[in-house]
Amino acid sequence: MPELPEVEAARRGIAEQLVGRTCTGYELYRPRLIVAPSGLTLDAIVGHPLESVGRWGKYLWLVFPSCALLVHLKLTGQLVARGSSIPGFAAGHPVPPYDAPLPHKSTALRIDFAPDAHLFLTDVRHFARVQLLPPTELPATLQALRLGPDALSPDFTLDTFRTALARRRGIRLKAALLDQRIVAGLGNIYADESLWVSQLHPERPVMTLTDEEITRLYWAIHEVLKIAVPLGGAKILNGRAVPPVGEFPYVHGRAGQPCIRCGTVILKRTVAGRGTYFCPRCQSAKKPTMEPSPELSARAAS
């Protein structure tokens, strides 16, 4: 957290409510948030309009005429917009609560926009970073990150996915989905959800996958994101899924609960260094996988 759906929710909120507005000032509560190898400061955005906002994987950028802000929320970053001139939005990590008074003790930055709109970046663990750079350097900086195709991009095709997996044949599936060079934007939650929808065990070596299984996993990623993005992400709080059994997320954060597809108790295991949730029956590493769930396909299409 935050992963592609949460960062995309922030991008959409900024695009709809803040792009075109002039920055009137800022308050930097935690100077270590800022990385500025080019020597720029946040003073460069004051008095200028926010021209555009973009996203690639988990990275978000805001472009002003002479300064771009490249944002990575890391593990616990949160973006909240408030003010009398906008509806407001909240996206990212759910702690502190989205409706908590701001600035919070962990708020790192506030950017003010005319006539009365404010964008807050809060991070309870202080890992988030904002890099300042000239807008002309943004494309090269993004390329240097060596990210794979964004999971929502037309560049993320079955062929590119198959080719990327072929280069990492010796690793396990969970590690492959977390590798941002294979596909950008997936993290712990949506990797688990994609593996559950495709009914593949998280510890399966990539080299053991059939072409049919790769195809099923590819479409499962799309299916999961089609559900998660409109929601602004899965509701996970303190490592536990918030909604009742049967609602999204279907497996992550649900250790000890019954799998909604087969009724077997969901297990949690550490895979690729991350807490990983899976159904030991319908994601078995030994038996053939079951047919994809028509109920979930119908939900994703609705």
Image (spheres, rainbow, N blue to C red):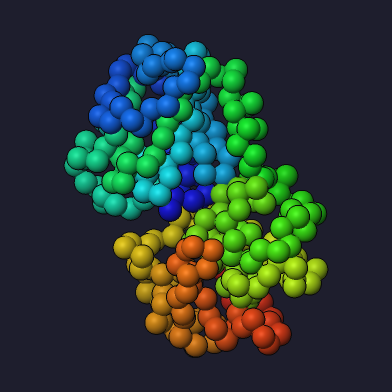
Name the image quarter holding residue 186.
bottom right
User: Residue 285 placed where, x, y %?
Assistant: 64, 81
**217, above or below 200, in the image:** above
Q: Nearer the viewer, residue 20 or 267?
A: 267
Q: Residue at x 37, y 42 (%)?
A: 127
Q: Residue at x 39, y 16 (%)?
A: 41
Q: Nearer the viewer, residue 298 or 225?
A: 225
**292, above or below 71, in the image:** below
User: Residue 129 placed where, x, y %?
Assistant: 41, 35
Q: Residue at x 66, y 77 (%)?
A: 292
Q: Is residue 3 left or right of residue 194?
A: left
User: Residue 22 placed where, x, y %?
Assistant: 39, 17
Q: Is residue 199 left or right of residue 116?
A: right
Of all residues shown, which one is farthest toward the front?
170
Q: Which quarter of the figure is the C terminus placed in?
A: bottom right
Name the image quarter holding residue 29.
top left
Q: Residue at x 59, y 61 (%)?
A: 175
- Using the rendered image of the protein, determine whether residue 296 is visible from the camera's viewpoint: no
- Using the rendered image of the protein, determine whether residue 145 is visible from the camera's viewpoint: yes
Count up the numbered dots.
0
